[in-house]
Image (cartoon, rainbow, N blue to C red):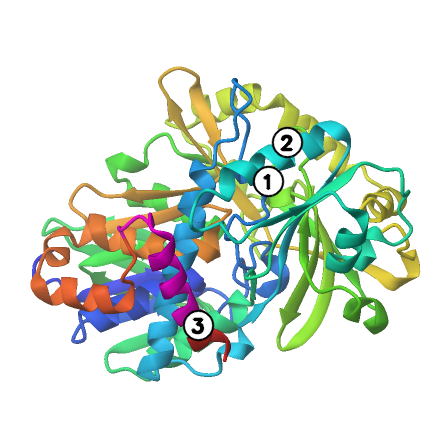
Amino acid sequence: MTETRKKIVLIGGGIMSATLGVLLKKLLPTAQIDIFERLDRVAAESSEAMNNAGTGHSAFCELNYTPENEQGLVDITKAVKIASAFEVSKEFWAWLLREGDIRQPEAFIRHVPHISFVWGADNVGFLRKRYEAMRLHPLFEDMEFSEDSEVLQQWMPLVMNGRDPAETVAATRMQIGTDVDFGTLTHKLFEYLTTQNNVALHLQSEVRDLCRQDDGTWRVEVRDIVSDTDQEYSADFVFIGAGGGALPLLEKSNIEEAEGYGGFPISGQWLVCNNPEVIERHHAKVYGKAAIGAPPMSVPHLDTRVIDGKKALLFGPFAGFSTKFLKNGSYWDLPASIELENILPMLAAGWHNLALTQYLIQQVAQSPEDRFDALRAYFPEARIEDWRLEIAGQRVQVIKKDDEKVGVLEFGTELVCASDGSLAALLGASPGASTSVVAMLDVLKKCFAAEMKTPEWKTMLKKMAPSYGAPITKANRCHHSREVRQRELFF
């Protein structure tokens, strides 16, 4: 990107666009940034707290991030990557607090212990191996492990009360875990952005089409939903961060790099506690093992949350199926996304993921009693009258071409960029919001490669996110930086 490329369009009013917008405004203060959101407020889709299952993903307790390999060894590679990314997120938020760009961190981030809980001899054996592998890394050296029911009773009384004393159980705990309300954080980032010169947030504005011009710029066609009129914007750089709505817009861009991508939508539901006395008795994120075939967003957990400043207790999420790509989307989203280039990868991905199809059928067929039985596996003394069912967010898992299997279903996020760096799109779901800062720094690395090498950008990036691109290998360094961020964010 040359110095003259100063018109920027961000599509989507969620945590990704908000984060990228702040980064770009700090690095290119004179740039014109236009942000388009089809709803009447920001953070109303995947970033909204009730829609978001990732409330501080740091791989402390998510067992699906540490699979066993064929030799029976626990692979912590993905956990290290995600935990490192979350440390960078906290660095960036702490820097914004020091700069005075956002305030009141207690409104969006709090200490909540992260616990992994399992039962049965095989699962306990796995958790013990996982603990032994993880505690050797500086990011996880504070992890605790116990099979003692009395200790576990102290860690998570709701989970242990009423449980058979003879049951084989175990848990790990990370006390430095967090709960993040990404909806509130997104609002704070946009509050900062909208006070800056040359930044415009356009609500109820739906991007309908993208077209690359002969000079390399983009023509962005936008429908003003209120006035029912169309407008055109010119952009040197476009970011598509519209959650489930990113895939259709990426397809409209017609960039070569987008060929073969498809999406598989998965919906979700929560059981939400409405008894304040029960809510106050639990203070942890307790994650279990996912069912065979379950997507990562459906790992069951009894979850302490703080939503809009109020403590809440959720269990789930339960997966479901809808052809919508967004919670506020259309049932035609999935059919409309099918193209000649992606139909074979989508069919192949479906064939290779029959267990997921079976799992979703089972989830959709669940009765209220079935969901309550799942809750009681984690909270034996739960009463059905204390809980209500709420609709969670919509996720679109990435399907892409594969030389061996024709098409594969990816559980994670995928960054797709035009070869000239003029357009980037973020597809996929978990861990999503928690790794938003690293994801957006990766956008800059791929799309603003020349600028990233300049002394000015290097100096600024070192201030904003000093750990980006630098693997944590020394325990003392990890502890020092973490303690600084903890003080800045929590006190």
Main SS type for the magenta part? helix
Q: Nearer the viewer, mark 3 or mark 1?
A: 1
- Residue 242 makes an appearance in the image: no
Q: Is residue 115 above or below residue 489?
A: above
Q: Which mark is residue 203?
A: 3
Residue 136, x across and y down, in percent: 46, 42
Residue 161, x across and y down, in percent: 87, 54
Residue segment shown in magenta: 469-486
Say if the magenta span includes residue 471: yes
Residue that carries the numbered disc 2 in the rendered image: 126
Say if the magenta span includes residue 216: no
Residue that carries the numbered disc 1 in the rendered image: 63
Q: Amino acid at mark 1?
A: Leu
**Extreme top residue here?**
404
Name the N-terminal-most of marks 1 and 2: 1
Q: Quadrant of residue 476?
A: bottom left
Q: How busy is the neighbourhood of tag 1: few (under 14 within 10 Å), some, or many (20 plus)? A: many
